[in-house]
């Protein structure tokens, strides 16, 4: 897999600190050049005692990747076919890996000075690991978060090599929740296959460190932010006396930026390990004036500090640590039953995605996390949910700290009604997790269980673990979709208007509203054709078949609704001619649905909605569902729809009620903005009578109304007031029936004698009344008119209504109020109207083409563009097949390649794409390709894609990537509009 090499922000922060500031780690990982690991099944090792000798011959053992998994090592060595491709992952002999394995390596002893102690450190073995060093059993690591810290000073070989061996106990089945703590999805889920060996292996770092008499254990810096002008810090740490005599020493700290220095004398008894606390009652230096606060993406800069700690005995440094932390304080409150999250006193509207796994075989590590999280930042996300705690690598949290991405962090429980086999090991690992990660500014919530409550005793234990070992600084939330949350799912596509109405309920919620805070909601997301070819054999490309199901586009991924997705592509854009055409059309579904998902929730920001996390933000396996960027880092239409919707300052149109709003999720009030909406027909002609503009102020962290778009020609009811006898909890207010959009509806309570009426404001002549019924229609009803809304006159009755769209011609009458009075319901659900429209003598036909375009722009007071947005709309909801009649677009493309050293060793393709033809250039897709082999230049960051150009318009595109991806500088740009 490609590795995105980005210089971490820590490099800049630490450049002024001496190389001795951080305790030296001598890597025993595979890439550390000191240890070469090998692996072999326990059952195939006749005499384990022999492997402890340096004379042991490892011929027949397989070269292992550490950190990694047993199965991953066999794949890396070419001993198994590529499990990403076709159905290979399903045909491998699981019994070969579903058992215990020995890991073994040899390495030379480090130089040890008098008084130094050498420690062997393990960060994680899945599921258990027995550690042997030069024939001595050091101990058992029980759980994949259980750390090992072993004193091997007296066991080191003074002259030759050392032998390190680990007996890895496989996870065993069943997995959820019996085997936890582990990677719960390893036995297969509806988005990843069963992984042979169940991800058993040495799954995290192995290294040596050196200290002297006293070691510092888990130093932890906490912050409180009573105001923007002042923060208070506290430092808690454990000291461990590694000797048989009492030790007295000096703890010194330097916090940067600011060069805040402090010191404190501390004494630790012989052989003891205990806590020490320093706070502002002891050290006034820990009150920080005008702190550089850590903010989530979009709300400010994710500023980070470092704290260099040294503990010295007798003038010599005994141990040193370097911490990275952010000054911030989280807060939580329930507002009308909905959980709201705050940081530094400010409410934060959550926009993010779930991570099922970083990579289904644990082949993601190091700087690749920087890339993955950077792409989430580029989508304007501010949160990632670490689903069932499936990401354990510290580099993930480092990247989230760096890019301002908060983490909703789960423990390792699914809603299965069983406890882990060993609740004590589970709880010990939970404490380990908290202590390992609590310095990270990004962690916002600790969560007990995915879609359920941890069974006794774990729920209370986890709550207490968070209170004790994280000081209650972050909330403990027992259930991922309840208690102030609006449920999970659904996980399949819907028409865009669905996300704006009260219909989008999740499963398992204990609140009655539609949006709230949703920790999972998603849709199938098909890949591009270029990615599809990489994992589906050509013979299985088309038509849809069982091989697609192996990548979860079938019964295996049923929650994604692949049948619905497939039919939506066909209904919206016409039957595909083959797989390439299907992939092309699918990207338009990806754009539209995913953008609407976020915009629909934002439409109700703080008025119910407090955030949304898509299922999922990234791809762990070559899949056809639930992703934004795919396994190969191609940025699908979902990525671009979400990136647009989640802009910090964003202008958007509601499919449900045709309103246009500005969503400002920054902490800055914006004055004198100009919002403009223009409508264009399919031929690119601007339909001037639909143009709207307004000057407005957009308050910080809120939505601001601009105007409504009226797509009816002369509907007298549009924009007027409506009143009703009742409103169903699942539907909109009465105004939803007069918003000129069949994406919203009014519905009554399930009773016969219910009504709705329209107030025209003043008398007008009515000759046609249109009722667009939902399935819950009237069996019989009356139409009434009034001049005072008190005395009503019947003008029409229907004793056998069939539902659907009714256009009722009446003798022209002048009136102010028009009522639909229900007499008898046709169903058990009451009355439900998409639209209640009123017309005069002549109802004008629409002047809009079957598909037309909406273009929104938002400019600041100086005329600078802050946000733009583009929609395609149909007179028949969802039917966009008229796009296939667009004339062929003609584009002019110019580009140049430049080096960018300020971002590391990068290259950037700068391109300008201009529409020089007479047709609209719809949904233009741009991809950079290497000339040498025709492969896409991926991973890459881009500023836009799937954009539309009207006649004469142009778009500047930038594509940034690692220089090593294009060593010869020879590239071509693939620039393909939908109407190619």
Image: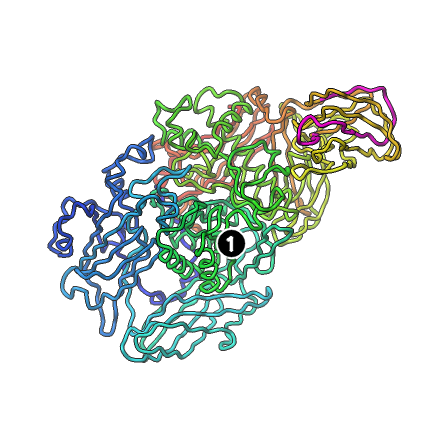
User: Above or below — where is 751 with respect to 209?
Assistant: above
Which residue: 66% across, 53% down?
A: 669
The residue beneath circle 1 is 477
Count of numbered tags: 1
In the structure shown, which secondary structural element does the residue marked by tag 1 occupy?
A: strand
Predominant secondary structure in magenta? strand
Front-most of 524 and 690?
524
Counting from the top left corner in percent of width and height, residue 374 is at 46, 47
Counting from the top left corner in percent of width and height, residue 269 is at 33, 78
Say if the magenta span includes residue 820: yes
Magenta-tinted stretch: 806-833
Quadrant assignment for the N terminus: top left
Residue 460 visible at all: yes
Residue 924 visible at all: no
Say if the magenta span includes residue 808: yes
Binning the other alpha carbons within 10 Å of mark 1 as few (below 14), some (14 to 19) or many (20 upward) gives many
280 relative to 791 in the view: left or right: left
User: Above or below — where is 666 with respect to 734?
Assistant: below
323 relative to 805 in the view: left or right: left
Front-most of 435 and 77?
435
Q: How is the image coloured?
A: rainbow
Counting from the top left corner in percent of width and height, residue 393 is at 38, 52
User: Above or below — where is 321 with respect to 98?
Assistant: below
Counting from the top left corner in percent of width and height, residue 214 is at 32, 73
């Amino acid at each position: 897999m490609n590795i995105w090499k980005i210089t971490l922000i820590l490099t800049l922060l630490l450049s002024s600190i001496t190389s001795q500031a951080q305790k030296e780690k001598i890597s025993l990982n595979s890439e550390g050049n000191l240890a070469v690991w090998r692996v072999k099944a326990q059952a195939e090792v006749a005499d384990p005692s022999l492997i402890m000798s340096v004379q042991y011959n490892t011929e027949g053992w397989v070269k292992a990747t550490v950190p990694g998994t047993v199965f991953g090592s066999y794949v890396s060595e070419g001993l198994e076919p590529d499990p990403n491709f076709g159905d290979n992952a399903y045909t491998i002999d699981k019994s070969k890996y579903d058992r215990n394995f020995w890991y073994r390596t040899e390495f030379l002893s480090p130089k040890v000075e008098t008084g130094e102690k050498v420690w062997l450190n393990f960060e994680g073995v899945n599921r258990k690991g027995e550690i042997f060093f030069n024939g001595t059993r050091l101990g058992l690591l029980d759980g994949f978060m259980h750390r090992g810290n072993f004193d091997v000073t007296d066991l080191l070989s003074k002259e030759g090599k050392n032998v390190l061996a680990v007996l890895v106990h496989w996870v065993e089945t069943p997995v959820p929740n019996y085997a936890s703590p582990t990677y719960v999805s390893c036995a297969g889920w509806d988005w990843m296959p069963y992984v042979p060996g169940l991800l058993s292996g040495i799954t995290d770092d192995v290294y040596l460190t050196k200290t002297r008499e006293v070691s510092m254990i888990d130093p932890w810096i906490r912050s409180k932010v009573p105001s923007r002008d002042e923060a208070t810090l506290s430092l808690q740490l454990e000291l461990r006396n590694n000797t048989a005599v009492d030790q007295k020493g000096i703890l010194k700290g330097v916090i940067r930026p600011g060069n805040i220095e402090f010191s404190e004398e501390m004494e630790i008894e012989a052989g003891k390990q205990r806590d020490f606390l320093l706070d502002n009652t002891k050290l006034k230096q820990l009150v920080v004036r005008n702190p550089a606060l850590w903010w989530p993406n979009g709300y400010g800069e994710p500023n980070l500090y470092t704290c260099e700690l040294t503990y010295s005995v007798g003038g010599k440094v005994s141990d040193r640590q370097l911490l990275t932390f952010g000054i911030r304080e989280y807060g939580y409150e329930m507002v009308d039953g909905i959980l709201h999250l705050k940081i530094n006193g400010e409410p934060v509207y959550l926009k993010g995605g779930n991570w099922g796994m970083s990579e289904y075989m644990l082949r993601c590590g190091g700087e690749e996390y920087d890339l993955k999280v950077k792409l989430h930042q580029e989508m304007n996300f501010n949160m990632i949910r670490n689903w069932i705690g499936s990401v354990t690598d510290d580099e993930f949290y480092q990247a989230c700290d760096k890019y301002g991405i908060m983490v909703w962090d789960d423990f390792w429980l699914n809603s299965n009604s069983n406890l882990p086999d060993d609740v004590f090991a589970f709880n010990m690992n939970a404490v380990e997790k908290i202590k390992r990660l609590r310095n990270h500014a990004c962690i916002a919530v600790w969560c007990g269980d995915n879609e359920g409550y941890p069974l006794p005793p774990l729920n209370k234990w986890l709550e207490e673990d968070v209170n004790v070992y994280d000081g209650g600084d972050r909330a403990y939330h027992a259930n991922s979709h309840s208690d102030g949350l609006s449920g999970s799912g659904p996980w399949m596509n819907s028409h865009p208007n669905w996300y704006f109405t009260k219909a989008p309920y999740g499963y398992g919620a204990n609140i009655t509203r539609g949006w709230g805070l949703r920790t999972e909601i998603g849709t199938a997301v098909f890949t591009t054709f270029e990615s599809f070819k990489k994992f589906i054999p050509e013979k299985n490309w088309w038509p849809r078949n069982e091989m697609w199901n192996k990548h979860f586009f079938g019964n295996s991924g049923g929650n994604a609704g692949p049948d619905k997705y497939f039919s939506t592509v066909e209904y919206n854009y016409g039957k595909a001619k083959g797989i390439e055409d299907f992939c092309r059309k699918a990207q338009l579904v990806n754009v539209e649905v995913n953008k609407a998902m976020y915009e629909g929730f934002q439409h109700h920001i703080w008025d119910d909605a407090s955030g949304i996390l898509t299922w999922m933000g990234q791809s762990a396996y070559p899949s056809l569902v639930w992703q934004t960027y795919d396994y190969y880092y191609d940025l699908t239409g979902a990525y671009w729809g979400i990136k647009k919707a989640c802009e910090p300052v964003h202008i958007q149109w509601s499919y449900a009620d045709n309103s246009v709003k500005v969503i400002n999720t920054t902490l800055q009030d914006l004055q004198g903005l100009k919002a403009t909406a223009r409508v264009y027909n399919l031929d690119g002609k601007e339909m001037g009578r639909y143009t709207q503009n307004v000057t407005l102020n957009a308050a910080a962290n809120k939505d601001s109304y601009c105007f409504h778009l009226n797509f009816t020609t002369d509907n007298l009811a549009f924009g007027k007031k409506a009143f009703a006898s009742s409103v169903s909890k699942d539907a909109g207010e009465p105004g939803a029936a007069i918003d000129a959009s069949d994406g919203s509806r009014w519905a009554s309570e399930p009773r016969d004698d219910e009504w709705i009426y329209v107030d025209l404001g003043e008398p007008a002549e009515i000759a046609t009344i249109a009722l667009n019924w939902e399935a819950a229609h009237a069996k019989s009803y009356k139409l009434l008119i009034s001049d005072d809304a008190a005395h009503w006159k019947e003008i029409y009755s229907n004793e056998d209504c069939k539902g659907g769209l009714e256009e009722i011609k009446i003798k022209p009458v002048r009136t102010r109020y028009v009522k639909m009075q229900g007499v008898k319901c046709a169903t058990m659900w009451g009355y439900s109207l998409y639209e209640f429209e009123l017309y005069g003598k002549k109802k004008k036909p629409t002047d809009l083409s079957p598909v037309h375009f909406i273009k929104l722009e938002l400019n600041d007071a100086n005329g600078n563009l802050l946000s733009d947005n583009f929609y395609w709309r149909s007179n028949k909801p969802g039917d966009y097949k008229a796009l296939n009649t667009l004339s062929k677009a003609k584009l002019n493309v110019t580009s140049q390649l430049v080096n960018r050293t300020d971002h590391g060793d990068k290259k950037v393709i700068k391109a300008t794409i201009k529409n020089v033809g007479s047709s609209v250039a719809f949904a233009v897709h741009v991809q950079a390709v290497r000339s040498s082999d025709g492969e896409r230049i991926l991973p890459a960051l881009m500023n836009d894609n799937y954009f539309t150009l009207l006649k004469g318009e142009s778009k500047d595109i930038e594509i940034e990537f690692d220089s090593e991806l294009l060593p010869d500088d020879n590239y071509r740009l693939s620039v393909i509009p939908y109407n190619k």
